Amino acid sequence: MSVLLSDVVSGSAVGLRGRLWRLSASELRAVAVSASAEILRLEAVRVAVVDELSLRPDDQVIASRGVGCWLAANTMLQVRDGKKIAALGAALRPFPAVTARFDVGDCSFDHAVLIVAFCESPPKGMPEEALPRCIDLLLAAASGVEATTTKVRYVIATLERVFESDEIPPAEDVDRNELRIASTLNGRVVVRGDFAALTGEMLLSALSNLTMPTPAPDGTPDSRSAAKRTADGFTELIRRYLDCAKTGVDGGQRPHVNVHINARDLAEHRDCAAAPAPDGVAVAVAVSDLDVGHMPWLGPLSVSQTRLLSCDCFLSTVLLDGHGAPLGAKPGKRLVSAEQRVALIARDKGCAFPGCMCVPAWTDAHHIRHWANGGLTVMNNLVLLCRSHHRLMHRKSGFVGKWVIRIGADNKPWFIPPSSIDPQQHPRPANTFKT
Protein backbone atom coordinates (compact mmCIF):
# COMPACT_ATOMS: atom_id res chain seq x y z
CA MET A 1 0.00 0.00 0.00
CA SER A 2 1.38 3.42 -0.92
CA VAL A 3 2.16 6.10 1.66
CA LEU A 4 -1.01 7.95 0.76
CA LEU A 5 -3.18 4.84 1.08
CA SER A 6 -1.70 3.88 4.46
CA ASP A 7 -2.21 7.45 5.63
CA VAL A 8 -5.87 7.27 4.64
CA VAL A 9 -6.39 4.04 6.59
CA SER A 10 -4.49 5.04 9.72
CA GLY A 11 -5.33 8.75 9.76
CA SER A 12 -8.38 10.72 10.73
CA ALA A 13 -11.45 11.06 8.55
CA VAL A 14 -11.41 14.83 9.09
CA GLY A 15 -10.86 16.47 5.71
CA LEU A 16 -10.51 13.05 4.09
CA ARG A 17 -13.31 13.52 1.57
CA GLY A 18 -11.47 16.46 0.02
CA ARG A 19 -8.43 14.24 -0.66
CA LEU A 20 -10.07 11.09 -1.93
CA TRP A 21 -10.33 12.45 -5.49
CA ARG A 22 -6.61 11.77 -5.84
CA LEU A 23 -7.18 8.02 -5.51
CA SER A 24 -8.15 5.77 -8.40
CA ALA A 25 -11.09 3.38 -8.20
CA SER A 26 -8.78 0.43 -7.49
CA GLU A 27 -7.09 2.40 -4.71
CA LEU A 28 -10.44 3.31 -3.19
CA ARG A 29 -11.39 -0.37 -3.17
CA ALA A 30 -8.08 -1.22 -1.47
CA VAL A 31 -8.69 1.40 1.21
CA ALA A 32 -12.21 0.07 1.87
CA VAL A 33 -10.90 -3.49 2.27
CA SER A 34 -7.97 -2.41 4.47
CA ALA A 35 -10.18 -0.25 6.66
CA SER A 36 -12.58 -3.17 7.15
CA ALA A 37 -9.70 -5.46 8.16
CA GLU A 38 -8.48 -2.80 10.59
CA ILE A 39 -11.93 -2.58 12.15
CA LEU A 40 -11.93 -6.36 12.72
CA ARG A 41 -8.45 -6.15 14.27
CA LEU A 42 -9.45 -3.35 16.63
CA GLU A 43 -12.67 -5.15 17.51
CA ALA A 44 -10.66 -8.19 18.62
CA VAL A 45 -8.28 -5.95 20.58
CA ARG A 46 -11.18 -4.30 22.39
CA VAL A 47 -12.80 -7.63 23.28
CA ALA A 48 -9.50 -8.99 24.65
CA VAL A 49 -8.75 -5.85 26.69
CA VAL A 50 -12.28 -5.59 28.09
CA ASP A 51 -12.22 -9.27 29.05
CA GLU A 52 -8.90 -8.86 30.87
CA LEU A 53 -10.30 -5.81 32.66
CA SER A 54 -13.31 -7.86 33.75
CA LEU A 55 -10.93 -10.35 35.34
CA ARG A 56 -9.00 -7.59 37.14
CA PRO A 57 -11.59 -4.85 37.80
CA ASP A 58 -10.45 -1.67 39.50
CA ASP A 59 -12.51 0.84 41.47
CA GLN A 60 -13.85 2.56 38.35
CA VAL A 61 -15.13 -0.69 36.83
CA ILE A 62 -16.62 -1.83 40.13
CA ALA A 63 -18.35 1.52 40.60
CA SER A 64 -19.84 1.25 37.12
CA ARG A 65 -21.49 -2.09 37.95
CA GLY A 66 -19.40 -4.09 35.54
CA VAL A 67 -16.99 -3.61 32.68
CA GLY A 68 -19.73 -3.43 30.06
CA CYS A 69 -21.41 -0.46 31.72
CA TRP A 70 -18.01 1.17 32.31
CA LEU A 71 -17.17 0.87 28.61
CA ALA A 72 -20.49 2.41 27.61
CA ALA A 73 -20.06 5.27 30.10
CA ASN A 74 -16.64 6.16 28.68
CA THR A 75 -17.39 5.72 24.97
CA MET A 76 -20.24 6.41 22.58
CA LEU A 77 -21.45 2.83 22.90
CA GLN A 78 -24.85 1.94 24.31
CA VAL A 79 -24.95 -0.11 27.51
CA ARG A 80 -26.28 -3.16 25.68
CA ASP A 81 -23.35 -3.01 23.24
CA GLY A 82 -20.83 -2.68 26.04
CA LYS A 83 -22.32 -5.69 27.77
CA LYS A 84 -22.24 -7.69 24.50
CA ILE A 85 -18.51 -6.98 24.16
CA ALA A 86 -17.84 -8.08 27.73
CA ALA A 87 -20.02 -11.16 27.32
CA LEU A 88 -18.21 -12.26 24.16
CA GLY A 89 -14.83 -11.93 25.84
CA ALA A 90 -15.95 -14.20 28.68
CA ALA A 91 -17.64 -16.66 26.33
CA LEU A 92 -14.51 -17.05 24.18
CA ARG A 93 -12.31 -18.26 27.06
CA PRO A 94 -13.27 -21.98 26.91
CA PHE A 95 -13.02 -22.12 23.12
CA PRO A 96 -9.45 -21.32 22.01
CA ALA A 97 -10.05 -22.32 18.39
CA VAL A 98 -12.79 -19.70 18.04
CA THR A 99 -10.72 -17.15 19.95
CA ALA A 100 -7.72 -17.66 17.65
CA ARG A 101 -9.79 -17.16 14.52
CA PHE A 102 -11.47 -14.08 15.97
CA ASP A 103 -8.16 -12.56 17.11
CA VAL A 104 -6.60 -12.79 13.64
CA GLY A 105 -9.61 -11.03 12.12
CA ASP A 106 -10.93 -14.05 10.24
CA CYS A 107 -14.25 -14.14 12.09
CA SER A 108 -16.50 -11.17 12.72
CA PHE A 109 -17.92 -10.18 16.10
CA ASP A 110 -21.47 -11.26 15.22
CA HIS A 111 -20.33 -14.61 13.86
CA ALA A 112 -18.20 -15.27 16.94
CA VAL A 113 -21.27 -14.59 19.10
CA LEU A 114 -23.31 -17.15 17.13
CA ILE A 115 -20.58 -19.79 17.31
CA VAL A 116 -19.92 -19.53 21.06
CA ALA A 117 -23.68 -19.52 21.72
CA PHE A 118 -23.89 -22.86 19.89
CA CYS A 119 -20.87 -24.19 21.79
CA GLU A 120 -22.31 -23.13 25.15
CA SER A 121 -25.70 -24.72 24.44
CA PRO A 122 -25.13 -27.54 21.94
CA PRO A 123 -27.97 -29.82 20.82
CA LYS A 124 -28.92 -32.25 23.57
CA GLY A 125 -28.27 -35.21 21.31
CA MET A 126 -24.69 -34.16 20.49
CA PRO A 127 -21.85 -36.10 22.18
CA GLU A 128 -18.99 -34.07 23.66
CA GLU A 129 -16.44 -35.54 21.27
CA ALA A 130 -18.33 -34.08 18.32
CA LEU A 131 -17.87 -30.46 19.44
CA PRO A 132 -14.40 -29.88 17.87
CA ARG A 133 -15.62 -30.98 14.44
CA CYS A 134 -18.73 -28.86 14.79
CA ILE A 135 -16.55 -25.85 15.64
CA ASP A 136 -14.49 -26.54 12.50
CA LEU A 137 -17.67 -26.51 10.43
CA LEU A 138 -18.88 -23.27 11.98
CA LEU A 139 -15.53 -21.53 11.59
CA ALA A 140 -15.35 -22.60 7.96
CA ALA A 141 -18.73 -20.98 7.36
CA ALA A 142 -17.72 -17.83 9.29
CA SER A 143 -14.29 -17.32 7.70
CA GLY A 144 -13.27 -15.43 4.61
CA VAL A 145 -14.90 -12.77 2.51
CA GLU A 146 -17.69 -15.15 1.47
CA ALA A 147 -18.84 -15.62 5.07
CA THR A 148 -22.39 -14.51 5.77
CA THR A 149 -24.64 -14.71 8.80
CA THR A 150 -27.06 -16.78 6.71
CA LYS A 151 -24.35 -19.39 6.10
CA VAL A 152 -23.43 -19.58 9.78
CA ARG A 153 -27.07 -19.89 10.84
CA TYR A 154 -27.59 -22.59 8.19
CA VAL A 155 -24.71 -24.67 9.59
CA ILE A 156 -26.09 -24.26 13.11
CA ALA A 157 -29.55 -25.34 11.95
CA THR A 158 -28.03 -28.32 10.13
CA LEU A 159 -26.10 -29.45 13.20
CA GLU A 160 -29.21 -29.13 15.35
CA ARG A 161 -31.01 -31.48 12.96
CA VAL A 162 -28.10 -33.95 12.77
CA PHE A 163 -27.96 -34.42 16.52
CA GLU A 164 -31.59 -35.13 17.10
CA SER A 165 -32.80 -35.75 20.62
CA ASP A 166 -36.14 -36.80 22.00
CA GLU A 167 -37.14 -33.16 22.13
CA ILE A 168 -38.59 -31.66 18.96
CA PRO A 169 -36.50 -28.75 17.62
CA PRO A 170 -38.30 -25.41 17.95
CA ALA A 171 -38.32 -25.00 14.17
CA GLU A 172 -40.31 -28.25 13.81
CA ASP A 173 -42.60 -27.97 16.83
CA VAL A 174 -46.05 -27.51 15.34
CA ASP A 175 -47.56 -27.09 18.82
CA ARG A 176 -46.02 -23.60 18.82
CA ASN A 177 -47.81 -22.60 15.62
CA GLU A 178 -49.98 -19.54 15.99
CA LEU A 179 -51.98 -17.40 13.60
CA ARG A 180 -53.80 -14.34 14.89
CA ILE A 181 -56.31 -12.50 12.72
CA ALA A 182 -57.93 -9.39 14.12
CA SER A 183 -59.89 -6.51 12.69
CA THR A 184 -58.81 -2.95 13.41
CA LEU A 185 -60.93 0.10 14.26
CA ASN A 186 -60.71 1.36 10.68
CA GLY A 187 -62.02 -1.94 9.29
CA ARG A 188 -58.73 -3.43 8.17
CA VAL A 189 -57.38 -6.85 9.21
CA VAL A 190 -54.06 -7.53 10.94
CA VAL A 191 -52.47 -10.97 10.54
CA ARG A 192 -49.62 -12.20 12.74
CA GLY A 193 -48.26 -15.72 12.63
CA ASP A 194 -45.54 -17.91 14.05
CA PHE A 195 -45.10 -21.21 12.20
CA ALA A 196 -42.89 -24.26 12.18
CA ALA A 197 -40.32 -24.47 9.39
CA LEU A 198 -42.41 -26.96 7.39
CA THR A 199 -45.48 -24.72 7.45
CA GLY A 200 -43.28 -21.78 6.52
CA GLU A 201 -41.82 -23.78 3.64
CA MET A 202 -45.31 -24.51 2.31
CA LEU A 203 -46.30 -20.86 2.61
CA LEU A 204 -43.16 -19.56 0.90
CA SER A 205 -43.46 -22.18 -1.85
CA ALA A 206 -47.08 -21.21 -2.48
CA LEU A 207 -46.25 -17.49 -2.55
CA SER A 208 -43.03 -17.74 -4.55
CA ASN A 209 -44.42 -17.22 -8.03
CA LEU A 210 -47.15 -14.85 -6.84
CA THR A 211 -44.78 -12.37 -5.19
CA MET A 212 -42.25 -11.91 -7.98
CA PRO A 213 -41.77 -8.33 -9.28
CA THR A 214 -43.90 -7.79 -12.37
CA PRO A 215 -42.88 -5.03 -14.82
CA ALA A 216 -45.56 -2.61 -15.97
CA PRO A 217 -46.90 -2.93 -19.54
CA ASP A 218 -44.53 -0.16 -20.64
CA GLY A 219 -41.55 -2.09 -19.26
CA THR A 220 -40.91 0.04 -16.18
CA PRO A 221 -39.90 -1.89 -13.04
CA ASP A 222 -42.45 -3.02 -10.48
CA SER A 223 -42.87 -0.12 -8.05
CA ARG A 224 -44.38 -2.22 -5.28
CA SER A 225 -42.38 -2.89 -2.13
CA ALA A 226 -41.57 -6.45 -1.11
CA ALA A 227 -44.22 -6.27 1.62
CA LYS A 228 -46.84 -5.06 -0.86
CA ARG A 229 -45.97 -7.84 -3.33
CA THR A 230 -46.30 -10.40 -0.53
CA ALA A 231 -49.70 -9.01 0.46
CA ASP A 232 -50.89 -9.07 -3.15
CA GLY A 233 -49.59 -12.62 -3.58
CA PHE A 234 -51.34 -13.77 -0.40
CA THR A 235 -54.58 -12.23 -1.63
CA GLU A 236 -54.24 -14.04 -4.94
CA LEU A 237 -53.45 -17.30 -3.16
CA ILE A 238 -56.67 -17.08 -1.16
CA ARG A 239 -58.67 -16.12 -4.26
CA ARG A 240 -57.37 -19.11 -6.22
CA TYR A 241 -58.09 -21.46 -3.33
CA LEU A 242 -61.69 -20.24 -3.07
CA ASP A 243 -62.18 -20.28 -6.85
CA CYS A 244 -60.88 -23.83 -7.22
CA ALA A 245 -62.53 -25.04 -3.99
CA LYS A 246 -59.73 -27.60 -3.52
CA THR A 247 -60.44 -28.36 0.09
CA GLY A 248 -58.74 -31.76 0.07
CA VAL A 249 -59.27 -34.93 -1.93
CA ASP A 250 -58.56 -38.36 -0.44
CA GLY A 251 -55.75 -39.97 -2.37
CA GLY A 252 -54.84 -36.79 -4.22
CA GLN A 253 -51.20 -35.91 -4.68
CA ARG A 254 -49.77 -33.34 -2.30
CA PRO A 255 -46.75 -31.72 -4.05
CA HIS A 256 -46.65 -28.80 -1.62
CA VAL A 257 -43.13 -29.17 -0.26
CA ASN A 258 -39.87 -30.33 -1.84
CA VAL A 259 -37.44 -32.04 0.52
CA HIS A 260 -34.04 -33.27 -0.69
CA ILE A 261 -32.13 -36.02 1.13
CA ASN A 262 -29.63 -38.75 0.30
CA ALA A 263 -31.22 -42.18 0.05
CA ARG A 264 -28.74 -43.74 2.49
CA ASP A 265 -29.42 -40.99 5.01
CA LEU A 266 -33.15 -41.54 4.75
CA ALA A 267 -32.70 -45.26 5.28
CA GLU A 268 -30.44 -44.97 8.31
CA HIS A 269 -29.51 -41.99 10.47
CA ARG A 270 -25.71 -42.01 10.59
CA ASP A 271 -23.88 -40.26 13.42
CA CYS A 272 -21.41 -38.94 10.87
CA ALA A 273 -20.48 -35.75 12.65
CA ALA A 274 -19.87 -37.59 15.90
CA ALA A 275 -17.63 -40.27 14.41
CA PRO A 276 -14.04 -39.83 15.64
CA ALA A 277 -11.35 -39.34 13.04
CA PRO A 278 -8.38 -41.76 12.94
CA ASP A 279 -5.33 -40.56 14.84
CA GLY A 280 -3.14 -38.31 12.77
CA VAL A 281 -5.65 -38.09 9.95
CA ALA A 282 -7.09 -34.73 8.99
CA VAL A 283 -10.75 -35.00 8.03
CA ALA A 284 -12.36 -32.48 5.73
CA VAL A 285 -15.88 -31.83 6.93
CA ALA A 286 -18.50 -30.24 4.73
CA VAL A 287 -22.07 -29.32 5.60
CA SER A 288 -23.23 -31.28 2.55
CA ASP A 289 -21.84 -34.46 4.16
CA LEU A 290 -24.20 -34.24 7.13
CA ASP A 291 -27.27 -36.46 7.04
CA VAL A 292 -30.26 -34.13 7.15
CA GLY A 293 -33.05 -33.25 4.78
CA HIS A 294 -33.05 -29.91 2.99
CA MET A 295 -35.90 -27.63 2.01
CA PRO A 296 -35.24 -25.08 -0.76
CA TRP A 297 -36.71 -22.16 1.20
CA LEU A 298 -35.92 -22.80 4.86
CA GLY A 299 -32.98 -25.16 4.71
CA PRO A 300 -32.26 -28.10 7.08
CA LEU A 301 -34.95 -30.55 8.13
CA SER A 302 -34.30 -33.34 10.61
CA VAL A 303 -34.21 -36.94 9.41
CA SER A 304 -37.19 -37.81 11.62
CA GLN A 305 -39.35 -35.14 10.01
CA THR A 306 -38.10 -36.12 6.55
CA ARG A 307 -38.98 -39.76 7.14
CA LEU A 308 -42.43 -38.72 8.33
CA LEU A 309 -43.06 -36.76 5.14
CA SER A 310 -41.69 -39.52 2.93
CA CYS A 311 -44.23 -42.06 4.18
CA ASP A 312 -46.86 -40.71 1.80
CA CYS A 313 -45.19 -38.64 -0.88
CA PHE A 314 -44.47 -38.18 -4.57
CA LEU A 315 -40.96 -39.61 -4.99
CA SER A 316 -38.42 -38.52 -7.59
CA THR A 317 -35.06 -40.30 -7.79
CA VAL A 318 -31.91 -38.58 -9.05
CA LEU A 319 -28.67 -40.54 -9.59
CA LEU A 320 -25.58 -38.52 -8.64
CA ASP A 321 -21.88 -39.06 -9.27
CA GLY A 322 -19.18 -38.89 -6.59
CA HIS A 323 -19.10 -35.09 -6.86
CA GLY A 324 -22.85 -34.68 -6.45
CA ALA A 325 -23.51 -33.93 -10.13
CA PRO A 326 -26.70 -35.52 -11.53
CA LEU A 327 -26.21 -38.42 -13.96
CA GLY A 328 -29.86 -39.12 -14.60
CA ALA A 329 -33.34 -39.01 -13.13
CA LYS A 330 -36.18 -41.50 -12.92
CA PRO A 331 -39.80 -40.44 -13.47
CA GLY A 332 -41.57 -39.48 -10.28
CA LYS A 333 -43.89 -41.97 -8.67
CA ARG A 334 -46.34 -41.82 -5.84
CA LEU A 335 -45.55 -44.25 -3.03
CA VAL A 336 -49.16 -44.78 -1.99
CA SER A 337 -51.51 -44.95 -4.94
CA ALA A 338 -55.02 -43.54 -5.01
CA GLU A 339 -56.41 -47.09 -5.16
CA GLN A 340 -54.41 -48.13 -2.11
CA ARG A 341 -55.59 -45.11 -0.18
CA VAL A 342 -59.22 -45.91 -1.00
CA ALA A 343 -58.63 -49.43 0.30
CA LEU A 344 -56.94 -48.10 3.45
CA ILE A 345 -59.91 -45.84 4.13
CA ALA A 346 -62.26 -48.79 3.71
CA ARG A 347 -60.18 -50.82 6.17
CA ASP A 348 -59.11 -48.23 8.78
CA LYS A 349 -61.94 -45.69 8.36
CA GLY A 350 -59.63 -42.89 9.51
CA CYS A 351 -56.75 -42.80 11.96
CA ALA A 352 -56.23 -46.38 13.14
CA PHE A 353 -54.54 -45.46 16.42
CA PRO A 354 -56.64 -46.79 19.33
CA GLY A 355 -59.08 -44.18 20.57
CA CYS A 356 -58.50 -41.64 17.77
CA MET A 357 -61.53 -40.28 15.92
CA CYS A 358 -59.70 -38.41 13.15
CA VAL A 359 -61.42 -38.59 9.76
CA PRO A 360 -59.70 -40.05 6.63
CA ALA A 361 -59.16 -36.66 4.96
CA TRP A 362 -56.76 -35.68 7.76
CA THR A 363 -54.64 -38.84 7.71
CA ASP A 364 -51.37 -39.98 6.12
CA ALA A 365 -50.50 -43.45 4.90
CA HIS A 366 -47.78 -44.60 7.31
CA HIS A 367 -45.32 -47.34 6.37
CA ILE A 368 -45.12 -49.78 9.29
CA ARG A 369 -41.64 -50.68 8.09
CA HIS A 370 -40.29 -47.60 6.33
CA TRP A 371 -39.86 -48.08 2.60
CA ALA A 372 -36.33 -46.68 2.78
CA ASN A 373 -35.48 -49.65 5.02
CA GLY A 374 -36.96 -52.17 2.62
CA GLY A 375 -40.61 -51.90 3.60
CA LEU A 376 -42.96 -52.45 0.67
CA THR A 377 -45.81 -50.12 -0.25
CA VAL A 378 -48.42 -52.85 0.15
CA MET A 379 -51.56 -53.07 2.24
CA ASN A 380 -50.04 -55.25 4.99
CA ASN A 381 -47.30 -52.64 5.51
CA LEU A 382 -49.55 -49.56 5.53
CA VAL A 383 -51.81 -47.97 8.12
CA LEU A 384 -53.68 -44.66 8.22
CA LEU A 385 -52.56 -42.28 10.97
CA CYS A 386 -53.66 -38.72 11.65
CA ARG A 387 -50.96 -36.07 11.40
CA SER A 388 -50.58 -35.96 15.20
CA HIS A 389 -50.16 -39.72 15.69
CA HIS A 390 -48.01 -39.96 12.57
CA ARG A 391 -45.69 -37.33 14.00
CA LEU A 392 -45.66 -39.05 17.40
CA MET A 393 -44.71 -42.38 15.84
CA HIS A 394 -41.75 -40.80 14.06
CA ARG A 395 -40.28 -38.48 16.62
CA LYS A 396 -42.03 -38.07 19.97
CA SER A 397 -40.26 -39.36 23.07
CA GLY A 398 -42.30 -42.26 24.46
CA PHE A 399 -43.62 -43.24 21.04
CA VAL A 400 -40.64 -43.72 18.73
CA GLY A 401 -39.77 -47.42 18.63
CA LYS A 402 -42.04 -48.21 21.61
CA TRP A 403 -45.46 -48.60 20.06
CA VAL A 404 -45.30 -51.54 17.66
CA ILE A 405 -47.77 -51.95 14.80
CA ARG A 406 -48.54 -55.40 13.40
CA ILE A 407 -51.00 -56.62 10.81
CA GLY A 408 -52.97 -59.40 12.46
CA ALA A 409 -54.54 -62.58 11.15
CA ASP A 410 -57.64 -60.54 10.41
CA ASN A 411 -55.54 -58.40 7.99
CA LYS A 412 -56.12 -55.33 10.16
CA PRO A 413 -53.58 -53.28 12.10
CA TRP A 414 -52.97 -54.01 15.78
CA PHE A 415 -51.07 -51.75 18.15
CA ILE A 416 -48.77 -53.13 20.86
CA PRO A 417 -48.24 -50.53 23.60
CA PRO A 418 -44.96 -50.08 25.50
CA SER A 419 -44.57 -51.82 28.85
CA SER A 420 -44.83 -48.47 30.60
CA ILE A 421 -48.47 -48.32 29.50
CA ASP A 422 -49.32 -52.02 29.61
CA PRO A 423 -46.81 -54.29 31.41
CA GLN A 424 -48.31 -57.29 29.60
CA GLN A 425 -48.20 -55.45 26.26
CA HIS A 426 -51.52 -56.86 25.08
CA PRO A 427 -52.15 -56.02 21.40
CA ARG A 428 -54.86 -53.44 20.90
CA PRO A 429 -57.05 -53.45 17.80
CA ALA A 430 -57.20 -50.47 15.49
CA ASN A 431 -59.79 -47.89 16.38
CA THR A 432 -63.21 -49.55 16.20
CA PHE A 433 -65.38 -46.53 17.07
CA LYS A 434 -66.02 -45.83 13.39
CA THR A 435 -67.42 -49.26 12.51
Image (cartoon, rainbow, N blue to C red):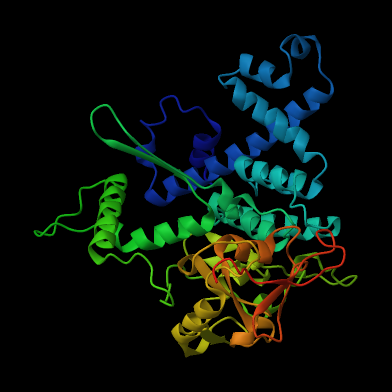
Left or right placement of residue 346 versus residue 223 in this view? right
| Along the viewing direction, whichever of 219 and 352 lies nearer the viewer | 352
Quarter of the picture containing the C terminus is bottom right
Relative to 331, is 377 on the left or the right? right
Which residue is located at x 57 percent, y 56 percent?
151
Does the rendering let one see residue 260?
A: no
- Left or right of residue 385, residue 291 in this image: right
The single residue placed furthest to the right in the displayed view is 279
Q: Quadrant of residue 410?
A: bottom right
- In the rendered view, tell whether residue 121 sits above or below residue 409: above
- The residue lying toward the viewer, choosing from 418 and 27, is 418
Which x, y percent locates residue 309? 56, 70
Location of residue 395 by image quarter: bottom right
Q: Quadrant of residue 161?
A: bottom right
x and y, in percent, of residue 250 in the image = 42, 74
Q: Residue 278 placed where, x, y %? A: 88, 72
Q: Percent position (x, y) of residue 90? A: 77, 33
